[in-house]
Image (cartoon, rainbow, N blue to C red):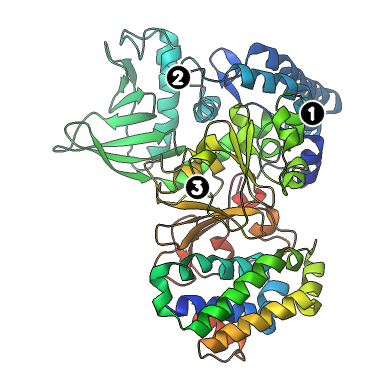
Amino acid sequence: MIAGLQNKFSWSGVAAAGAGAGVSVWSNNGLQLSGISEKTLPGMLGGIAGAAATSLVKGRDFGDTIMAQLPSIIGNTIGNLVADGVASRGRSKGGLVIPDDAQLSSASGFSWDESAIPGSYESNTNFTPQQVDDRSKVAQRIIERDKAAAERTYSFDILPGHNGVVTGQYEIHGGDNDGRISDVLPAAYDELALRYDRTTNSIGLDRMSSDGKATNYEMDAARTAELRNEQFKTDVAAGIGLGVMLGPITALVSAGAASSITTFGLANAANIMSGTGIVGEIITGVPLMTPVAAGSGVALASVAERAPNTIVATERGVAMTSELLSLQGTSKLAGDFRGIEGARVEEIISRVPSNWTLASQLKGMGIRFLDSTGIERLRLHGPGARAPIGSNSAAGWTARVHVPGTKNSYYDSLGNIVGPKAIAGHIPIYGNPNAGY
Amino acid sequence: MKHEDILWRLAQLSSLPFQERYVIGGTPDEYVLDTELLENVDSIKYLVRRPEQQVDFTDLQIRALEQLFEYVELHSGEALSGASGVEAAALIRESSVWHEMRAKAASALEAFGLSPAMTVEEIDRISA
């Protein structure tokens, strides 16, 4: 929990103010925006700087101040953001820092974006001192988590001609898909690799075979939660996160960037426009052009709904981009929902097996996934005003993961089986203050 | 589909005492959402309506379930329209929509040979 933030935050206030922002990242060169051009920066930077100034003048905590100013910061930013999103369609990710990297970067002072660093990933030439320093920082960061299990002394050297850094015991890689720290002293034909996986934003262990192929990826839930918490703090401090999760499409429409949405023609348009739905995936900066209505209780999966630049909206106003839905099944943890407390909706969707079917909730504000036999296995549900005060369901978005083969049992975030009424079975996800930030 | 996978959902929706204890009187540590009661029933239609599942049910059972599905789909918006816990409690206790849903769930239970007059503890048992 970030002291002084959660109890001041107003979901409805942010939604009413109109949110929708880019993902800000800290890299070696300072603040960058993923997929967003420089013209978006002044508004957001100005807002953040303003918050800092207010903090100084009033002696308030910077985080409190930026939360208080969030609507105006985002309001100033949204126009440029949307324009950038349109302009950047089809742009490759090369040279850009993807959000998960960004959040790790901001937490560690390290950029995983190898392609943006000349002479590293592409050409395998030696690292500059700065690059070595970057790698050392992230290596130290991750290895520190492992110290309790292995009391070792670490030193950092360049591995010549190789895309990595060798420590006393470890070789550190940063690649397009993940970052990995491998023990360079293989035990028999195996070696153990500590891996940061970008797709799931998790830290875990890989058992590596002698041919270098990873098997048995096992997520470390505690470390992942720790990393996620730090990301959350970074997001909030940068003025993104909760506000983005609940940004109404109204903001896009008023910015004149998504004119087709003004002719929504959906029964749920009012819900979406008023921000009672989630449009968290606007953070991708991808323009949202083609709304698709989803019938209540009807399975949503179809080719049309997975087409680019499409909003899939449920009757109660939960809006998802086709880009989000395209993540389904992409995680190596697909089918494994351990550790999703505090997880972003992108991560959760990536862990949904590709043969599960998306459906809207009946009248509730949420979505669900049915497995190939038609059994509901996962439910993501919005905050419920009718839920008991203090419960996870009242506080924010939650996930329900049904245990296969049982009538009415659910997993908690650690993978334990709990009863249907247990609070732990209503897992708080990203943006839910009960997620333990 | 096993009938027991259906019966607990019907029993929870049919019972005002169950709803009093866990929906209206739920605590932060142990609760059932009104939405869940309806979603749990609604989600079984995906299974019941599969052609290969039809042989597991009598015509009477199918008819009772379909009547419940239809009613829930048509009226769940009204049933869930309470803006607070207090409003939700009033709806659950007093509204005709909730009365009718409980009655239809009870009829479906009877079609499966179960008495809708189960205690909360009995419902808990068949729900586990």
Gap between marks 2 and 3 measured at Cα: 33 Å
Callout 2 secondary element: loop
Residue under numbered circle 3: A301
Q: Quadrant of residue B77?
A: bottom right
> Circle 2 sits on which residue?
A113
- Give a yes or no on whether discs 2 and 3 share a subunit: yes
Q: Nearer the viewer, residue B66 or A413?
A: B66
**Residue B32 in sight here:** no
Measure the C-alpha gap from mark 1 to mark 3.
30 Å
Q: CA distance from mark 1 to mark 2?
A: 34 Å
Rendered position, A158 above or below A24: above
Please tell me if label 1 and label 3 are on a single chain. yes
Q: Nearer the viewer, residue A235 or A303?
A: A303
Q: Are marks 1 and 2 on the same chain?
A: yes
Describe residue A221's horizontal placement relative to residue A269 as left or right: left
Foreground: A86 or A293?
A293
Q: Residues within 10 Å of mark 3 (few under 14, many from 20)?
A: some
Q: Position of residue A141 (x, y in %)?
A: 45, 30
Q: Is residue B66 above or below residue A136?
A: below
Three-letter amino acid code of the residue under disc 2: Asp
Rendered residue at 34%/36% (across/down): A194
Q: Name the residue beneath numbered marker 1.
A: A254
Residue B76 appears in the picture as rendered: yes
Q: Residue at x 42, y 32 (%)?
A: A142
Callout in the foreground (1, 2): 1
Chain letter of mark 2 equals A
User: Callout 1: few (<14), some (14-19), or many (20+) C-alpha neighbours within 10 Å?
Assistant: some
Quarter that holds the N terminus of chain B? bottom left
- Residue A434 location, x and y as percent? 64, 52
Which residue is situated farthest in the left direction here?
A188
